[in-house]
Amino acid sequence: MQKGRRFRDPVSRREFLKGAAALGVGAGVAGLSLQEAAGAAAKEVNIGVLYPTSGSQARFGQMCVNAVKLAVEEVNAAGGIKSLGGAKINPIYADIQSDPGVTRNQAERLMATGNLTAATGSYVSTYTLVATEVAERYKIPYVTGSIANKLTERGFKFTFQVSPKANMFGEMQMEFAGTLAGRGKRAAVVFEDTDYGTSTSKGVIDGAKKVGFEVVMAEPYTAKFTDATPLVNKIKASKPDLFFPVSYITDALLIIRTMKQLNVNAGIIAGGAGYLIPDFYKDLGKDAEYVFSVGSWNYDVNCAEVPKIAEAYEKRYGEFLMEHAGEAYVMIWVLADAIQRAASTDPLKVRDALAKTNLTKGPGSVMPGCRVEFDETGWNKRVHPVMVQWQKGQLRTVYPASDARVKPVWPVPAWDKRG
């Protein structure tokens, strides 16, 4: 069995799409008169899709784009936007090249045309902060899965955040750590030094105080480093019981390999991103076993529709649907639901419909908590992070109890006992 191929469901893919069609792309949509429908008819609805598909974050960006393609295909196969006469979602992709300056330019290029109904992306919070500034200026609704707190704390009216906020990740990590028997009290925290790392690590450090941990090290680093030895030597010298890294993929691999080389055996409770993608296990093999991480989504989230979604993605792309790609998929359905209810391609009307979103079923609802409802700031107030662990080559949800699919393996074996 291929790693990640773990779902079999008697409901067929055709039945799944039929069910989505029956919902009119979103639950609880009021019907339109023929006159209204004719007046609102459009052949397609343009959605800007901004992800890094080149540069340092290309791997993450491409997985997100793959998920967007799957979701768009499903929306369109289910009848498109029925309140607009079956108009199809037309994604307009922009490679933001893992660069905030390019992100700004690409957002300007797409939004200045006046042809977009909405936009979505951008994976890295630093890029999304830029893209949403442009979207706010052009009054284009922008739905994102990026986690920086300030995305929806700037008073913007056109930014919608489906994911948990960064501070919630650290709090969840520490809450989970507090449940581990015999875990000790010394915590080392290291984090890459962009908005993602600094905001997430703050939640870890603040959360440590609530559960009685002593933070013996809190160290930022630049994710582009090529040698983790100095950093890991500092970690080792701090003698932690638990280690909380916040990393992307290249730096995550370097840190874990160096920890093994220097025999640092602290339990690892990571901060998402690089620890949650297929490459982490592909590159590390058994050394990835038993690593915990917090995440905003996982392919086994406890929502009814998730198994079919995860199976469809893996069948097409040959790997499991990872955290940010799962969010990218959800966001297309959230947008489709809002456009359906707005019965318009007007960005202002779609923005108002997004603000009233309250999805409790269907593929647009499948964030942890199985509900998407935005508060007055544009944040999904129904979402929470989950804790996952690599077990036998599979990334499984272990906490909280409402989402857990397996029990955590704890205590974690020493490096030479893994596999």
Image: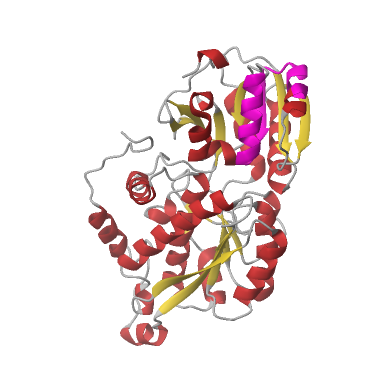
Q: Is residue 334 left or right of residue 134?
A: left
Q: Is residue 311 magenta?
A: no
Using the rendered image of the protein, determine whether residue 359 is visible from the camera's viewpoint.
no
Q: Nearer the viewer, residue 119 or 274?
A: 274
**Above or below for 31 versus 224:** below
Q: Is residue 247 magenta?
A: yes
Residue range (magenta): 233-261
Residue at 70% across / 55% down in the picture?
153
Residue at 62% across / 15% down in the picture?
183
Q: Is residue 121 left or right of residue 309?
A: right
**Above or below for 210 versus 77:** above
Percent x, y for residue 166?
65, 44
Q: Quadrant of the N terminus?
A: top left
Percent x, y for residue 17?
29, 59
Secondary structure mostly seen in the magenta stretch: helix
Residue at 47% across / 47% down in the picture?
367
Residue at 41% across / 83% down in the picture?
40
Q: Nearer the viewer, residue 35 or 229?
A: 229
Using the rendered image of the protein, determine whether residue 371 is visible from the camera's viewpoint.
yes
Q: In which quadrant of the rendered view does residue 190 lie?
A: top right
Percent x, y for residue 50?
57, 63
Q: Nearer the viewer, residue 15 or 101?
A: 101
